[in-house]
Amino acid sequence: MRFIEEFRQPALAQALTEKIKKCAGPPVNLMEVCGTHTVAIFRHGIRGLLPPQVRMLSGPGCPVCVTPNADIDKAIALASQPGMILATFGDMMRVPGSYSSLAEAKAKGADVRVVYSPLEALSIAQDNPKRSVVFFGVGFETTAPTTAASILEAERLNLSNYFFFSVHKVVPPAMKALLAGGEVNIDGFICPGHVSTIIGSHPYEFISRDYDIPCVITGFEPVDILQGIAMLLEMRNEGKAEVAIQYSRAVRPEGNPKALETMAKVFQTDDANWRGLGVIPGSGLRLAPALERFDAGKHFKIKTRPPKEIAACRCGEVLRAVCTPPECRMFGTGCTPEHPLGPCMVSTEGTCAAWFLYNPAGQAPRTPPAKAGG
Amino acid sequence: MCLAVPAKVVSITGQTALIELGGLTRQANIMLVPDLQVGDYVLLHAGFAIQTLNEAEAQETLGLLAEIAQIEEP
């Protein structure tokens, strides 16, 4: 058992595709919330295997994409301070803010470094004791425990030059905001597999209870995704709305208690601004009061100009699944992965980038149907 | 961003494990997954093991899928 090839077997994918065809009834919209799922679905050609009644919508689950310009502007302002080193994940580098990107700031002389792990940012701080190092932390519950661990380590080492600028967010409040917005009919959720390794299945229960929508926590291999879709269709056919776990080899109902405990030590929830969704109560993670000395926002004066958006960019609507990327008039013309206007085209997990890279040329975009009854 | 890959634990020293993935070995921090044993598979994300993989659960899923494949066989 290597946990990869076994879940890519063509015979199993074929059988699940047949099952999905048998289960498919009236048209349904199924949303994959997570950007990693979006890419996997496109890369493996899953959309092309589904009957026309089963439509996949991509949700707001790319952490880079939902970071608003104002926060990117602040990171650039931090990076541009004299003597500063700003460390962040590679995906963040090319995302355009209001006036520039971190990559452009680096080209102009700012010391911006790409790290694979928050622990590398910590090492940079240890290696440069006379300079301030800010880790620009982005990501959902999958990533937040790793950042939290780095801050606890900084505390243990008594580092005085390691700081943290958090745009970490949590997923369930965004799903709630999406449902409360009521712009798109969602008949089932493919819930994020790796976020759920941390948080477990309980935080999604309000969706089945309050909105009568089935949820399946799903893995990322093609057989996983097809099985997740089949499980959602089965639940709909049986009139059930439960939170089920397809990705049972990695997700326990209680999540990862140690990771949750680590997060709880370091963070507290706060309201956070999401691109496309606005301010969502309790959806952000900021440092707990006892650890405020690591808070870059408190330690440094961050001066930014008022944020601005590119009017033609429809990333906000793409993130709410109100429009598909090809419906944006900039898609593939004024906005490409080489010259992105918005974050959904920059991030490897952005919906626009996935459509651009994997959607076969000439295939008509599948647009979400109008909301029933209105 | 939420990409995590299965990797096999080769050895453990304190809070660090040597892990093997796709023929490569590298270090991972294991503070988020207590009670890890050599030979276990973990999900690796941003330099950390974030969860252990349960082989019995994986076998059960695959068994169920094999049954579906038999039923759906044309």
Image (tube, coloured by chain):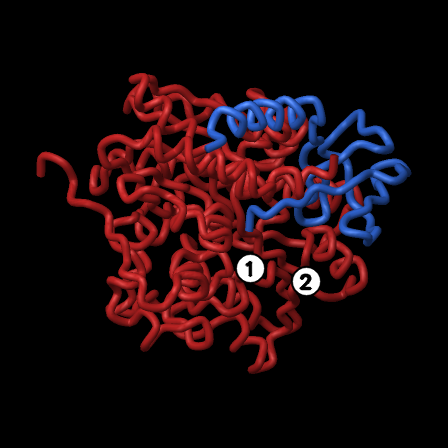
Chain colours: A red, B blue
Describe the element under mark 2 as helix, strand or loop. Answer: loop
Q: Residue at x 66, y 72 (%)?
A: A83
User: Label 2 amino acid?
Assistant: Ser
Q: Nearer the viewer, mark 1 or mark 2?
A: 2
Cα distance between the residues tagged 1 and 2: 10 Å
Viewer-closest of A145 and A256:
A256
Q: Chain of mark 1?
A: A
Rendering coords of residue A270 (x, y %): 44, 38
Viewer-closest of A74 and A343:
A343
Q: Is residue A240 above or below residue A179?
A: above
| Residue A344 appearing in the image | no
Whichever of callouts 1 and 2 sits on the residue coming sooner in the sequence is: 2
Q: Which residue is mark 1?
A: A300
Q: Quadrant of residue B55?
A: top right
| Residue A18 appearing in the image | yes
Q: Quadrant of the C terminus of chain A?
A: top left
Q: How many marks?
A: 2
Q: Residue at x 46, y 76 (%)?
A: A338
Rendering coords of residue B1 (x, y %): 55, 51
Q: Chain of mark 2?
A: A
Q: Is residue A255 above or below residue B13?
A: above
Q: Which residue is mark 2?
A: A132
Pointer 2 local density, CA inside 10 Å: few below 14, some 14–19, many at least 20: many
Q: Are marks 1 and 2 in contact (CB under 8 Å)?
A: yes
Rendering coords of residue A92 (x, y %): 53, 62
Describe the element under mark 1 as helix, strand or loop. Answer: loop
